[in-house]
Image (cartoon, grey):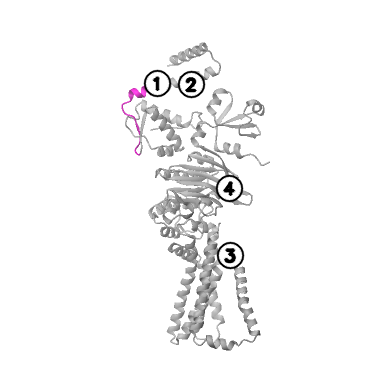
Amino acid sequence: MHIIINTSSMVPIYEQIVDAIAKEIMDGSLSAGSNLPSVRALANTLRISSLTVKKAYDVLESRGLVTTIHGKGSFVSMNNDGLIKESLEHEAEEKINDGLNRLVKLGYTKQQCDQLLHLLLEDLYDSN
Amino acid sequence: MKTMMLYNLTMLKRNALSYGLSCIFVIVVLMLTVQNGADISDTLFGITVFLLVYLSLLLVTTISLDRYDHGLNQIFLLPLSRKDYVLSKYWMVYGSTIILFLVALSILLFTGESNVDQIMLLVAVSCIAPILCAIQIPIYFKFDLSKARFIAMAVYAVLFLLVFIPMKFLSSIEIDFDVIRSVVTTTPWIPLFMVLTITVIFNLFSMGISFKLIQTIQD
Amino acid sequence: MIQINSLTKNYGSFHLNVSFDVCDGEVVAMIGRNGSGKTTTFKALLGLTIADGGQVHINGKDAWHLCHEDKSSIGVVMGDAGFNKVMRLKDIERIMASAYPKWNREHFLGFATKYNLAMDKPLSTFSTGMNVLAKLDMALSIGATTLILDEPTAGLDVVARTKILDILRDFMAEGENHSILISSHISSDLATLADRILLIDQGKIIFETTMNALDESYGVIKFTDQDYATSGFTNEPSLKTPWGTMVLTNDREDIRTKHPDWIIEKTTLDQLMMILVGKEEA
């Protein structure tokens, strides 16, 4: 598991950990059933509070990516290629929603949002 | 307790130079002032007895040494009670008294001139160390080194007066001391018994005070 | 586990009254200005200073009447407690071995070798860093499950400090029930070790948070004096500086969304302390 924390990023550390682990599960570097380091061990390695790691593991568990067995540790969930995809889709949806909400708070109309989305999509697909 | 004894002995060892030098100094002074014509065994005997008293008083000063470098806090963090700490100081005194008593006794026995009276005298004289230390130990617990010395002297002065003034008073009303003296010394067991009793009483009283004092000491 | 309930100590005009817990598996850090009561709290909970009131329980037992085994579960490193400087580690090893039933001689000697602590020289020849390492060695060789450390890294350079923090992290990793109560002025150290922060000022704990909450929700908004006046945040904890005003908020993300042009940073412990207790007395 290779996680680098960006301490100057506004993204909370626990979220960075969730994203990093989720990515590794998705691309297969963390295989199903493999053991995650203990909360304390990961906290020590990353030099952060164990409560932060615990929160990250809890979030991963709530998304179904990780299973924690009390006394044994945390494991990457089995048989969940479908689940992973679903969870990542859900996450992406949430993030888009979040962005849209912010635009609405700034006073964007539905049309303006639509326009912006189109523009962004074009840029995205063009650059790829 | 054994931990504290180990601690005390280590402190003595680490400070052996200063403690040892001062004892040697005392011995040399004694030897130089001993009267001509006194034989070796008397001299050795006298030195041992004096060392008995001097060393015991010196041991009491380790109490002040313990305070340096926040040493007392470290001791109280150890898994031993504050009472154990106090007791170890008394036992250092009793231990050295017994050792030096045995040394003096051996010297006495080897010169072949010993008799029961002399041995009893030795026992009585050996009690001086525990008595003096009983007075000093609580004082050293309560005050730091520089004050403690003066206060100890003040206490001795007070005790001396407590004995001296009544005696002066009694002699002025013409009580016949000779009579009392002859009764008391009918057998040397009586004064010996009196000295031992005073030793025990002083030490128990002193321990009581020390145990109380140590509970409230904070660094 | 340490449970402190209304621990009270009075010195003239200074009144200490604190209550907090340190749970198994937790690292709790106490921060505060000099004289705020950190060391007094530590000494009182250990019975080195006689408290005027309150209760302290360590692993369920009265901290001021611990039996020998229970005392062995607490390792202490503080400037206000140490062996007399004429002692050598060799002497200390014998004393500790005699005092502690679970004394680990191999660990003590191994640690001393690893960190180049001379066994044969008196403590008076040790540097500050070596002294701390020696005390840590002692604390870690008695079979302790809880460490109580009062400013263990004071006066040490970052290399030495990191070494010590690594040792503390290893200690936490070695047991699920291990816990640490630490006080420090060096916030960057605590950010890499602590789980929970207690801010103490004038004998009272005035603020408490987890490092996670600090990272997630707390923020410092930096205003010019003009902007501050119209910001609507004039009732929040703040600190006036030569360049303007810093305001503490615990709703960072919401404010960033509402005011994308404002300068908002993650809060450091130093900023937290300056804003909450940094004002000079009137």
The dot on residue B145 is 3
User: Do discs 2 and 4 belong to a common subunit?
Assistant: no
Asked if residue C155 shows in the view, the reply is no
Going 57% across and 46% down the picture, which residue do you hit? C17
Please state the horizontal and vertical placement of residue A88, each as a whole percent of the image. Answer: 39, 23
The dot on residue C16 is 4
User: Do discs 1 and 3 belong to a common subunit?
Assistant: no
**Tags 2 and 4 touching, CB below 8 Å:** no
Between the C-alphas of marks 1 and 3, the distance is 77 Å
Between the C-alphas of marks 4 and 3, the distance is 31 Å
Going 66% across and 42% down the picture, which residue do you hit? C281
To which residue does mark 1 refer?
Answer: A89
The dot on residue A98 is 2
Q: Residues within 10 Å of mark 2 (few under 14, many from 20)?
A: few
Between the C-alphas of marks 2 and 4, the distance is 47 Å
User: Do discs 3 and 2 belong to a common subunit?
Assistant: no
Q: Nearer the viewer, residue C116 or C223?
A: C223
Please state the horizontal and vertical placement of residue B151, each as a whole percent of the image. Answer: 61, 68
The reply, left or right, for residue A76 in relation to residue A114 is left
Q: Is residue C246 magenta?
A: no
Could you tell me the amino acid type at mark 4?
Leu
Q: Viewer-nearest of labels 2 and 4?
A: 4
Could you tell me the amino acid type at mark 2?
Asp
Identify the chain of the residue marked 1, using the numbered disc in the image.
A
Identify the chain of the residue marked 2, using the numbered disc in the image.
A
